[in-house]
Image: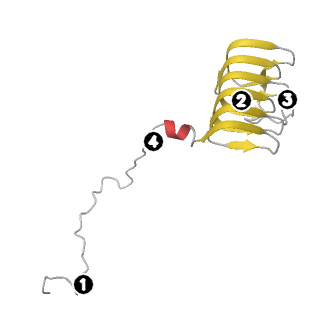
Amino acid sequence: MGLFSGKKTKENSELNAFMGVGTEYKGKLDFVGTVRIDGRFEGEISTEGVLILGRKAFIEGTVRVGQLNSCGEILGNVQVKEKAVFEKTSVLKGSLDTPVLVVEKGAVVEGTIRMTKGAAIETKPKVVSANFGGGIKPVARELEVAKTGSDDSGA
């Protein structure tokens, strides 16, 4: 996974929080950046950032994240804005909504999967216009119509 490598990319950026094996938490977790969970979590997780689940992780509830990298187990509804990766040891029982999905051989996904085009659908398209003519108005021309031998004009 490259989590602790020296390179800083969006997928393996600095770890903001870590919930280790043997840790249990119930409630709501909102965070910025990257969080790794190796323990047990019950409730709601919400972020625009990255959620990393270790092999011993067990999540029960609702997960809404920017990116998901899972080696653990999730029981519930998952919404991923950018990309969901389920490695060979991961299990998902529930629903998944994501634009990009990677499932390694050995991973278990039970439930519904909805592939969307992501955030692009939710935002309005930007309209860009430019006038490079320096005030020159376009000239209107009448379109020429090709005549065929079947027209009734008699010409």
Query: Foreground residue, 25 or 148?
Result: 25
Q: Which residue is under mark 2?
A: 50
Q: Which residue is under mark 1?
A: 148
Q: Quadrant of the N terminus?
A: top right
Check disc 4 and report its element: helix, strand or loop.
loop
Q: Quadrant of the C terminus?
A: bottom left
**Amino acid type, residue under disc 4 in the picture:** Lys
Give the residue displayed 72% in from the left and 17% down from the top: 42
**Amino acid type, residue under disc 2 in the picture:** Val
Query: Residue 145 occupies which quadrant of the picture?
Result: bottom left
Q: In the displayed structure, does residue 62 sit left or right of residue 37?
A: left
Q: Position of residue 138 (x, y in %)?
A: 28, 60
**Residues at marks 3 and 2, CA–CA distance in whole angstroms:** 16 Å
Residue 126's tag is 4
Give the residue displayed 81% in from the left and 45% down from the top: 105
Give the residue displayed 83% in from the left and 14% down from the top: 23
Query: Foreground residue, 100 or 2?
Result: 100
Give the residue displayed 80% in from the left and 13% down from the top: 24
